[in-house]
Amino acid sequence: MTLYLDNAATTPVRPEVLEAMAPYLARFFGNPSSHHEVGEAAASALDDARRRVAAVLGMRAGDVMFTSGGTESNNAAIKGLVLGSGRRHLVTTAIEHESVLASADYLARLHGVEVTHAAVDATGTLTPEALAAALRDDTALVSIGYANNEVGTIQDAAALADVAHARGVPLHLDAVQAAGWLPLAGLGADAVTVAGHKIAAPKGTGILAVRGRLPFEPLLHGGGQERGRRSGTPDVAGAVAIARALQLAEAERLDEAARLSALRDAFIARVLALVPGARLTGHPTRRLPGTASFVFPGTNGETVLLELERRGIVSSSGSACAAGSDEASHVLTALGFAHDDARTAVRFTLPHALAASLDPVADAVADAVSAIGSRG
């Protein structure tokens, strides 16, 4: 039986989520923009989903728009807030998700926006002091990942928001990996990104919440849906699904985070004890409860993954959005890892439902690395 430990890439849809969305795929199929009974039923469901999401994020229902996922939400947040501001300076870091870095590159190439990558330390932590040093009078936006998708390091989002706001700059928080593990309300963020398939909703569902007072230039133009911020007929079933998934994840978050953190810590300790030369990547303690990431110098990450899969364990070498690339992780090289060591990365991301000890997985990791080494 295969043990799936790549939940940062995607998660299975929960039965409760399927049950919640099913009626809006068939029975209540109306267009929520239509002014008749069938359309109004869909509109009511969409409004309810928006309120549920807003309650978890600590924002207003009118701030919430539904998208196709984290990549669209990050693109819309960064391009929409920078272009809407009239300013031409963006602050982010070199360890962000590709959708953030590519959006910043687009703004630099086509709109003359200057991009500053604030310095992070060897654990992937952005300090308030480092952020303050990167800000300018013309900074339009700070865009930061709440928790890193590869190494799991958690940022002090509230402290970073305070620094940005002291200079009159809004903060966009990429919370794709953080949702379901960390609190999303009360952080001071002005824009928040969530992806449905990371929290047991279907792929193709997402959330971008942007405070209504902020000028915003939409990516999509047309009929003016989502208060003019994202035109197009809304995916009502998808909105219902992600709202339900987010509510469930938030309700279970504290208990699950504590339980998974203990399993994660025991697993990390065993891998480091059993595998000579293994190094933990990311912050040793301020990391996502379900993330354990390593480099195994002298191996190749992809080869380790194949050996683990032969032993019934599925994990990854890093971001699924960079799948197929033989390049070293940009996150690890930004943290100071040598190129060759960065190419040995393996990431284990745990499911919320995990209850058993991960000692057998640690033993399998040791066996896999040993088997590769014996081939010399």
Image: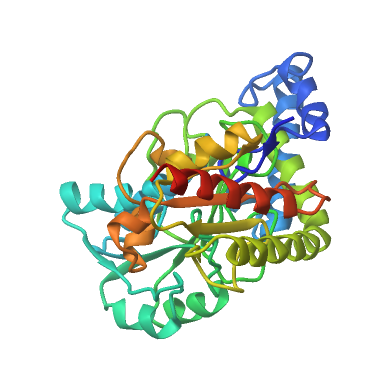
Decide which of 215, 267 is in the foreground and name it: 267
Any part of residue 49 in sight: yes
Left or right: 148 with respect to 263? left
Q: Residue furthest top?
A: 26
Left or right: 335 with respect to 48? left
Decide which of 102, 362 is in the foreground and name it: 362
**Exactly how many numbered labels are in the figure?**
0
Q: Position of residue 151 (x, y in %)?
A: 50, 60
Left or right: 368 with respect to 319? right
Instruction: Give the quadrant of residue 285.
Output: bottom right
Q: Please say if 128 is above or below 10.
A: below
Q: Position of residue 192 (x, y in %)?
A: 54, 56
Q: Please say if 324 is above or below 297.
A: above
Rendered residue at 57%/42% (across/down): 315
Colour pattern of the rendering: rainbow
Q: Residue furthest bottom?
A: 129
Rendered residue at 60%/42% (across/down): 6
* Quarter of the picture holding the N terminus: top right
Left or right: 232 with respect to 311? left
Any part of residue 72 in sight: no
Q: Position of residue 331 (x, y in %)?
A: 38, 58
Q: Position of residue 143 (x, y in %)?
A: 41, 62
Rendered residue at 64%/54% (across/down): 179
Q: Please say if 243 is above or below 265.
A: above
